[in-house]
Image (cartoon, helix red, strand yellow):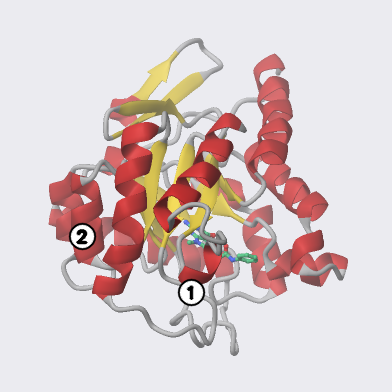
Amino acid sequence: MQSPAPPGFRAALVFVSQKRFVMKMNFAGRELDLSRCQVMGVLNVTPDSFSDGGRFNRPDAALVRARQMVADGASFIDIGGESTRPGAAPVSVQEELDRVCPVVELAARELDVVVSVDTSAPEVMAETAKLGAGLINDIRALQREGAPEVVARAGIPVCVMHIQGEPDTMQDRPEYQDVCREVSAFLEERVRAAGLAGVRSDRILLDPGFGFGKSLDHNLQLLASLEYLRSLGYPLLVGVSRKSMLGHITGRGVNERLPASLAAATIAAMKGAGIIRVHDVAETVDAVRVVTAVKEAG
Ligand code: 8Y4
């Protein structure tokens, strides 16, 4: 059975039959239907990401990787210049701009894809929006001073992700009374802040933030209850690819987690995620196509 149309998304909901609706969102001129699950490829542009032996300069090497992900079926490329791994050195805004901007500009100009920018810095949001970015992906949920206003002015969608604490210490002792309710309440509060700054409600995506201040049990409860978060009325973005929750379940190292990642992506797609953020685009696109085919038969 198809789920009922979520509330709060009236403008962009188009019913195509009694049973089915499409949830369209406009990303800097590219319209995508998020009622069919889309795949977002991860493109890190931290200095260790492209040791290319001098064959390409760094932005060109990143573009080669991005082009392959588009050929593999990605609708989004998520470009990030800040490592959020615990213990990673903080990155200055200027350094982040220097890493991210050349790749955003190239990808937006050269590729048929929505360029997403993984950043919490309002300066990076503003600059990359000018260069053609179609989505801001903020793991800190627009909590930096001025971020909601910048996103409102840029006029592009934003993904608001739940995080408990700061990346450096978030995994020390994550604690919740009721993780689903608390994640949901946090996201609703951040949606409210975005709305007060002028961000339109048809430009908001939500993300439970798997692994961001959560134990294995917290992550599992959230994935099991993804429909509950969807009932807030916004499309969901989900990132589980290769994450340590999958390592805890399977006992596998980070480079042996593709089957587990595909299982988790399949579950998220079945439970209504609009976008899945992954490292392995081609494989995930196949998994998601199976989910979409089954949904459209039902
Ligand atoms: C191996 C490699 C294992 C990387 C884990 C990881 C999310 C996100 C990240 C997410 C949204 C990551 C930027 C963490 N995760 N953005 N970003 N949602 N919206 N770790 O879940 O991939 S980085």
Q: Give coordinates of residue 236: x percent, y percent.
A: 49, 46
Instruction: Identify residue type, mark 1.
Output: Thr
Q: Give coordinates of residue 138: x percent, y percent.
A: 37, 61
Dot 1: element: loop
Location of residue 133 with respect to 190 vertically, above or below: above
Q: Nearer the viewer, residue 239 or 22?
A: 239
* Quadrant showing the N terminus: top right
Q: Nearer the viewer, residue 3 or 13?
A: 13
Is residue 159 something one can see in this rendering? Answer: no
Instruction: Identify residue type, mark 2.
Output: Pro
* Crowdedness near tag 2: few (<14), some (14–19) or many (≥20) residues, C-alpha within 10 Å: many
The furthest residue to the top: 17
Q: Residue 148 shows which numbered tag?
A: 2
The furthest residue to the right: 251
Q: Residue 11 shows which numbered tag?
A: none
Q: What residue sits 31% from the left and 53% below the top?
A: 102
Q: Is residue 12 left or right of residue 122?
A: right
Q: Is mark 1 within 8 Å of ligand 1?
A: yes
Dot 2: element: helix
Residue 109 falls in which quadrant of the image? top left
